[in-house]
Amino acid sequence: MTAARKGMILRAQQGLLSGASSLRQTVLSLHFWWLMGLIFLLCSLLLATGLLVWVQAEQASLRDDSEVELERIVNQQETALFNIFLSFEQQLLIAANTEDIRDFGGDRDAAARHLEVIESQLPNLFQARILSPDGAELVRVDRMGNTIKRITQSDLQDKSRRYYFERASEIMANEIYISPLDLNIENGVIELPWRPTVRLVTQIQGRNGDKAGYLVFNIDVSSILSRFGRFSGRNIDVSLVNDDGYWLAGRPNDQLWGFMTGSNRGLATDAPDLWAKIKQDTRDDFLEFKNQLYAVRHLSLSGIVAGGSLVNRRVEDNSLLILGSTKVPNRIFDPEARDFIFIAIWVLLSGMLSWIFAYHVVKRQQARVIQKRVDGQLLEIQRMASLGRIVAGVAHELRTPIGNALTTVSALSEDLDDLVADFKSSEMKRSTLDRYLADLKDGCHIVQSNIERAVALIGHFKRTAIDQSTQTRRKFELGPVLNSLLETLRPEFRKTSIIVKKDCPVGLMMESYPSAIDQVILNLLQNARIHAFSGRKSGTVSIRAFRLSADTICIEVADDGIGIAEEFRERIFEPFWSTKWNSGGSGLGLGVAANVVNRVLMGEITVNSVLGEGTTFRIVIPVTAPRATVKTDVQYTD
């Protein structure tokens, strides 16, 4: 490669790099950020989809956990209610049938002592009484703190108008009446502090089997009701409600016992829709209402106050309801700190990945743009270099016919001067005139022959030069294009002992880019001239064209030269790679040829080479070429 050509390529590359820098600035400010934003949006949509699926799964899991925890706490409260009434029925019936209690009319002190023993054994029993058949207290033992005290005769009260006595007066022997859960009343006033109470009543039979009175146990349930309320560590509320929807436990004091305090506050008044829903479905189950999850447990007071044997019961208002509630977990509207950390990390990673991906995409786009421009520049440089070599060869070849014509014209001019001189001397003979005329005729024939040869050579050059300098898609016959190219190159190959042969059938029509075909064949022939016969004095290069199928044509350029080493075969089409930089090789010929075949002619080029036997380049191109993807049109006009 000459210094001028290297300088041309260097200037082209520098110009391209400068243009690429300007293009990069433009792309980075517009396309880069647009692409990065698009990728980030896709990552965000992926995040939102993943988060939605994950949140739904976690919310379902949290709901299951909430149900399990809610059920566990409700079960604890239910078990505690059962435990507090454990064995009270048996103790009541046993006590009612003891001698001391049945003979209370004759010995009230013995009956009182017996009740004191029972009360000392049952911590939740805070009051044991014997009522007369008409409802007056005859014997009464109260628990005051840790002390069990018998109430004096003067402090005994008349309970004949209390509802539980009125209901209990209807029971038969060995039956038990269980009162509703309410507050204990002393002397017509609710006892303070409140003492939630359940009363168990049974008959006392005298010796003759008659009704002697009633044995009444007052059971204090305040300790267990105090356990209802909010379980702050688990964000769970557990309340106790009676059958009429009044709060009994688990709520502020101003909302409790509304049917006794006159406030009338209760679940039925505070949340009527929820109460109606609970009353509709009497099953023990979970329900969701206004973003709250509820566990409902219906209890029968007769079932809670259970004895060890079959007991006949008359129960007054015996239904209780344990209502556990917790907020329905909503991971979307109630995010946790870890959610924000996760989103922040995802956004950071998405931003970084979007930046990296967009950067590499834009860089690749820039590289493709630059590569296209470099390809165009290389095609132009190689075409101009080829034209330069063709011009040099044609100019050298034109010297012979033009020189011959000039010499002949000079000789004819001298003969014409001699003819004029002889004619003026009047000594010209017929034979002399005939000789001059014959010489003039021969000279004109020689001049005409050489000029025709020059004109033909110029015609071939012009046709090849036009094809080389334009990238126009047109219909043409392949044979004449190859003939013109070979005629143009004949002077260059005549200097060597390399023979160029052509085999192309007549009428092989194409609609393609003749300049591109010229470019490829020219580069392959130049490559063969420079590389194929190194160390040899002669050789043959053959060009064979034939129709491969209805839509494709194959052109083979084969030589019987030294072949290509196997380690070089994968690199021969790389631009600027050559084994003979100092012997006429530019490293562009095969690279440009491959580029033109692939991107202009839309075909394929392959190579098959055997060391010592030769190399064959096989080009398969469509008969009708698509529009070229590399714009290298440079129009030259006369």
Image: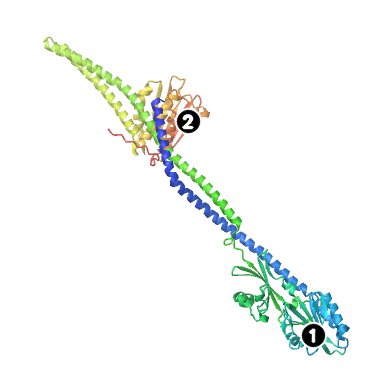
Report whether 117 appears left or right of 488.
Answer: right
Q: Is residue 322 visible?
A: no
- Point out residue 284 in the picture as x, y percentages from the top left corner: 68, 72
Q: Secondary structure at mark 2?
A: loop
Report whether 605 appears left or right of 462.
Answer: right
Packing grade of label 1 (10 A; few <14, some 14-19, many >=20) is: few
Q: Which mark is residue 155?
A: 1
Closest to the observer, 340 or 581: 340
Quarter of the image with the N terminus in it: top left
Q: Which residue is depicted at the point 53% across and 47% down?
A: 353
Q: Secondary structure at mark 1?
A: helix
Compared to 631, does 193 lie above or below? below
Q: Which mark is residue 572?
A: 2
Which quadrant holds residue 268?
A: bottom right
Q: Amino acid at mark 2?
A: Ile
Q: Is residue 265 visible?
A: yes
Give the CA separation, mark 2 to mark 1. 123 Å
- Point out residue 3 in the picture as x, y percentages from the top left corner: 40, 25
Count of marks overlaid on the render: 2
Mark 2 against mark 1, which lies toward the viewer? 1
Q: Which residue is depicted at the point 71% across and 75% down?
A: 299
Compared to 508, does 246 lie above or below? below
Packing grade of label 2 (10 A; few <14, some 14-19, many >=20) is: many
Compared to 550, does 584 lie above or below? above
Q: Amino acid at mark 1?
A: Asp
